[in-house]
Image (cartoon, helix red, strand yellow):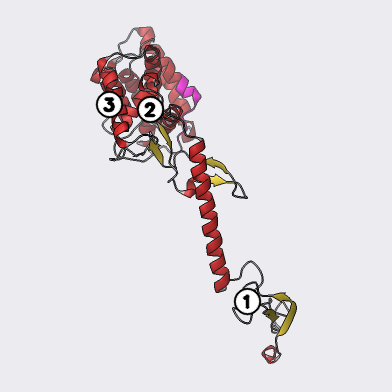
Amino acid sequence: MLNKLFPPTICETLYCPYCENINLISHYESRNSFNIKSAPLCPSCGHVTGEYCRCDNCRQYARLRAERKKDKQRSLILEKCSSIFIPPHEVQELSFEASVYLMALTRHSISEDFRFLFLFDKTQVKLAPTFDFIKQMQVSLKECGLISVSPESKIDCFTFNEEVTAITAYYPSEVQWELLPSFSAQEKKAYIAKLQEMIVSGNWPEHWQTECKVLWRALVLDECIEYLIYLLESRHFKEIEVGEKTKAAFDALLEEFSIAQIFNLSWQSVRDMVDSLTVKGIPHFQAVNVFTGTLLRKADRALAQGWIVKDARRDFNCPQSVVSSTLFNLFLKLGDSAWTTKVPGG
């Protein structure tokens, strides 16, 4: 410990950035050290040169810098939210799907003060059949000006460039969404009431007639995918990916069968698929591929033989989503008969 006996070396050209006119000093290190002298430090406040200094002044400066960065980010978020704001469409100009989605949200995800909505929150009652469908809802509602990103969203929901001068992206499933942000609570209630009145009256805009069939088909197709995923997950299949081939198969079946019949065919196909995988030793990652082939063959045979495919009952473990019940009950007034009705145009 002889190094402790030597006086520190004064660094004539180095000054403490926090203490006025205080030169930094270096101490001699022990003979076992990799360096002859210690890093220059301030004898007054203990500041050490380099980015890893943990002196009180450096920690306070880091806090101030973090606060300035946060203020800058918050300012950019406010600017971004203003730039992407779209004025809401008039009620009669809304697309059919946006109208269905808005009414579904009033039955599921809107806060008590009509300010926020919670599209992506997981709840006991599912908003839509799949996550992809919820993303589709978000896009449609945003395009019609019914929802907008809230400036109160957490900073972590956005990505910034390195200089923190611009927002490069945001995460739609993470940000906070506002309902009709330019409206007061009373105006929002009046807007929704006007839409409800138009729906109940049956005096629909002309473009709704065509758009209705498109949404009906898209929603039922998504319900078929949801049910397939449920059947596979309940049999402990993991990392399930339903691709375009299986979607095309379901789409083709919608031309001939109701969703109740397709659910029955799906249940039978999954049952047979599990047996086939077990007996033939087919790897589990090919489950969806085997299912699709089995499903199409069953459907082809039923049509060729002229068989009447029985209607399945909706599994209470895979209940109807809020969007589905809103479309078939509020808009189309079909109730439970939608379950056994073929998609129009099929």
* Residue behind mark 2: 270
Asked whether, in this view, residue 221 is left or right of residue 77, the answer is left
Is 248 placed above or below 7 here? Answer: above
Indicate the amino acid at tag 2.
Val
Indicate the amino acid at tag 1.
Cys
- Which residue occupies the foreground of this view, 163 or 216? 163
Residue at horizontal 41 percent and vertical 33 percent from the top: 147
Residue 245 among those drawn in magenta? yes
Q: Could you tell me which quadrant the C terminus lies in?
A: top left
Residue at horizontal 54 percent and vertical 40 percent from the top: 169
* Residue behind mark 3: 193
Q: Residues within 10 Å of mark 1 (few under 14, many from 20)?
A: some
Q: Where does the image place residue 333, in percent across and percent down from the top left?
A: 25, 17
Q: How many circles with numbers are drawn on the protein?
A: 3
First in sequence, mark 3 or 2: give its number. 3
* Residue behind mark 1: 19
Q: Where does the image place residue 212, in percent across and percent down from the top left?
A: 37, 16
In the rendered structure, find residue 108 and report the number of the disc placed on it.
none
